[in-house]
Amino acid sequence: MTRERLRALGKYLYEVAAAFSQLLNTILGGERDQTFSARIYEATLVRKPWAGVMRRIVNGLWFWQRDHVKSAYHADSEHTYLPDD
């Protein structure tokens, strides 16, 4: 597989993951254009009881990122979650 095809596959998988996260967030009562990770961070800012536990769980799943939910929140608010073409 060429480097270009790998890059295209990576972009596709990233976009599918973001779409799934937005769908999950919407199903759980959140805004349709916000990822679930961003919603978790937003909930920690207002000290919702479930947010701290969910933040640790989600950050654990994305262990290679320093603070995934915080990064997702900033990416959502700046609309930078989509990679450049």
Image: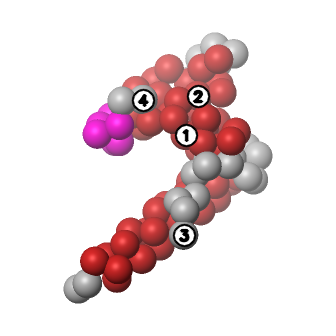
| Magenta span contains residue 64 | yes
Mark 3 vs mark 4: in front = 3
Q: What element carries label 3?
A: loop
**Magenta region: which residues?**
60-65
Q: How far apart are marks 4 and 1 (CA)?
A: 9 Å
Q: Which of marks 4 and 2 is nearer the N terminus?
A: 2
Disc 1 to disc 2: CB gap under 8 Å: yes
Crowding at dot 1, Cα within 10 Å, few <14 / some 14-19 / many 20+, comes out as many
Mark-to-mark CA distance, 3 and 4: 25 Å
Dot 2, crowdedness within 10 Å: few (<14), some or many (≥20)? many
- The quarter in which the C terminus is drawn is bottom right
- State which tag comes first along the sequence, 4 or 1: 4
Give the residue number, with chain letter if any, for mark 1: 72
Q: Can you tell which quarter of the image residue 22 is in?
A: bottom right
> Which residue corresponds to mark 4?
67
The mark that comes first in sequence, 1 or 2, is: 2
Q: Do the residues labelled 3 and 2 touch (CB within 8 Å)?
A: no
Q: Residue 41, labelled with which disc?
A: 2
Q: Which residue is painted at 73% across and 43% down in the image? A: 30
